[in-house]
Amino acid sequence: MTDAGFLDGCRAIAGAAHVLTEAHDTAPYLTDWRGRFTGRARAVVAPGSTAEVAALVRLCAAHRVPVVPQGGRTGLVLGSVPDASGDAVVLSLRRLNRVRAVDTFNRTLTVDAGCILADVQAAAEAQGMLFPLSLAAEGSCTIGGNLATNAGGTGVLRYGNTRELCLGLEVVTAAGEVWDGLRGLRKDNTGYDLRDLYIGAEGTLGIITGAVLKLFPQPKAAITALVGLCSPGDALKLLKLLEAECGPTLTGFELMSDVCLRLVASHFPSLSRPFPGHYPQYALLELSSHESEQHGVALLEGAIEQALETGIVQDAVVATSIAQSRALWAIREHIPLAQAAAGKNIKHDISLPISRIADFIEATDARLQAEFPGVQVVCFGHLGDGNLHYNIAPPEGIAHEDFLAEQLPVNRIVHDSVAAFGGSISAEHGVGALKRDELPRYKSAVELNLMRALKAALDPLGIMNPGKIL
């Protein structure tokens, strides 16, 4: 079959209106979110059902056409864009956006993979329930993408990663078959856990088209506070204190350096600074109380009072309204936007044993300054689950594009330090194409061979998102 014949086959399956081939139509699907790379594709195809996804995959398998699954296009590691060859078809799941079922007794929500995360949150809220996954891109990222990368977000400390929030999947395999694993079971020991195999696989083993998600009771109140600290070590002491005093009501613990807050103040002056002075580090805290707002406030204020008395915390602001809470969270959420406004930088999404984070920051900051004097470390992240966004901006007077030429040696310093402290070079963004070549340095040959064996068994033709992870 010619290329034209192949595209005719795509049109027969998905409808001509949903097969895009003109450059002005396909362009938005070919460039990554940060604008660093633009690939090429035969076409962008948007199927309208799981059956259409399966038929398209069978067509691609028959003609050895690579398939690049795509959700909300908010990925940060080049995982959902095609390479430069132009051989692949981008399979956009944006039309698979139905809420299929809600079961409030079983506390589950069954959705299509193309559902926007914010819409899933709203569907749960409409039933008086909570779907706790929350991240900056929730207005445009999709559940399929969240599952494909095992996204984290701000609620991992209490609720876990996306993997922990999913009970069942529907997947189109590399052979174009449909595995219906949409089971809302919390216990199911009937063989290999296929669900966990596909979660985090970034579309390299199959295409997630549906999911059964866990729901939780809505808390009666969420209480937010921002505290000033002298060091990451004090942040760890505060986390330990809060976990002891507040238990499972502690749902968020975000670490931010003063560099981060200064960036936000510089580029978003409308966001007021909570403190008149500056502190080296800050922690953004959130408690969710299922008793009452008064109960949550009493818990948080009591713990902060202890921390102030012992010198762990230097100053604190507790939000007394929803507007104040949103204002505090807005500071955290605007850090990546402020970085983008300041110019390009070298980003790292890493995880570490929580107990090693302060030592990692001290050691890695020092080595970077020794090798690249004057660099600015923009460090923030989810301290409660050990996930840092450890980003490096150029020294003053150095052009951002020139500094990006140092990405490989900067990455080597950071990633080697991560490995030395027992961490991972990817925490919640995935591997994609951006970190693919780093894996052999930090994973054993045994681990990589097991991954390759799984890939070969489930995708023998190698057509599922080729060039990603492996």
Image (cartoon, grey):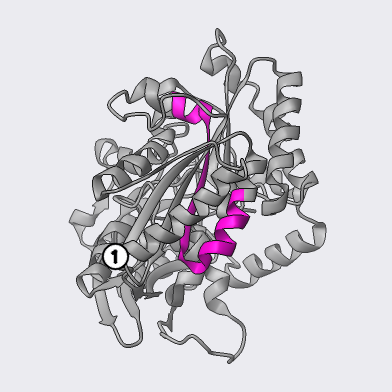
Residue at the extreme front of the image, as rendered:
309
Residue 316 picture location, percent across and down: 45, 40
Q: Which residues are magenta?
A: 238-262
Q: Main secondary structure of the magenta part?
A: helix
Q: Image quarter for residue 56?
A: bottom left
Residue 259 picture location, percent across and down: 52, 26
Q: Secondary structure at mark 1?
A: helix
In the rendered image, the vertical position of residue 372 relative to residue 243, given as above or below: above
Question: Who's the residue at 44% across and 45% down the image?
Answer: 81
Residue 3 picture location, percent across and down: 37, 52
Q: Which residue is mark 1?
A: 120
Question: Who's the residue at 27% across and 26% down the image?
Answer: 270
Q: Image quarter for residue 435?
A: top right
**Is residue 322 found inside the magenta-colored segment of the image?**
no
Which residue type carries mark 1?
Answer: Val
Can residue 153 be seen from the camera position used here? no
**Is residue 261 found inside the magenta-colored segment of the image?**
yes
Question: Who's the residue at 26% across and 50% down the image?
Answer: 322
Left/right placement of residue 470 relative to residue 17 reads right
| Nearer to the camera, 76 or 130 | 130
Residue at the extreme top of the image, as rendered:
397
